[in-house]
Image (cartoon, helix red, strand yellow):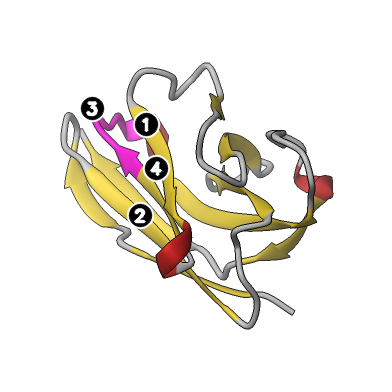
Amino acid sequence: QVQLVESGGGLVQAGGSLRLSCAASGRTLSNRVMGWFRQAPGKEREFVATITRSGGNTYYADSVKGRFTCSRDNAKNTAYLQMNSLKPEDTAVYYCAASRIVYGASTIDSEVKYAYWGQGTQVTVSS
């Protein structure tokens, strides 16, 4: 079992930055794909970013490409989402997710393929 805890959310003005962390316990993250999703009020949860097991490859939603950066530190069993140039439309609850054990260098943008989820952290961007 993998337990994930997000932190780093908060209130920021448009144009500002936040760094979300996703710390894992219970099992190593080093053999799992990590993903970030978000859910705005009244909307369905949507894909934001994903990173391969080694951290060598990432993939982003078009809406955040060039502004958000996904990274990981397997030695610390932690994944990160650096969010720059934030916009009011980025306001949402952000979730990190971990896949089951994988053996390839893949990314995953479908939430149904993730097995473990954090509780979410609120990000609010004011205009």
- Which of label 3 and label 4 is nearer to you? 3
Kind of element beneath mark 4: loop
Identify the residue under disc 2.
Answer: 20
| Vertical side of 63 occupied by 14: above or below | below
- Which of label 1 and label 3 is nearer to you? 1
Distance in Å between CA atoms under marks 3 and 2: 14 Å
Identify the residue under disc 4.
Answer: 91
- Which of label 4 and label 1 is nearer to you? 1
Magenta range is: 82-88
What's under tag 2, amino acid-wise? Leu
Q: Pointers 3 and 4 in contact (CB under 8 A)?
A: no
Q: Residue 111 magenta-drawn?
A: no
- Which of label 3 and label 2 is nearer to you? 2
Where residue 85 appears, as percent x and y from the top left, is 23, 27
Distance in Å between CA atoms under marks 4 and 1: 14 Å
Distance in Å between CA atoms under marks 2 and 1: 11 Å
The residue at the point 32 percent across, 42 percent down is: 82
Mark 4 closeness class: few <14, some 14–19, many ≥20 residues within 10 Å: many
Of the 4 image quadrants, the one containing the C terminus is: top left
Nearer to me, 121 or 6: 6
What's under tag 1, amino acid-wise? Phe
**Among numbered discs 3 and 2, the one appearing first in the sequence:** 2
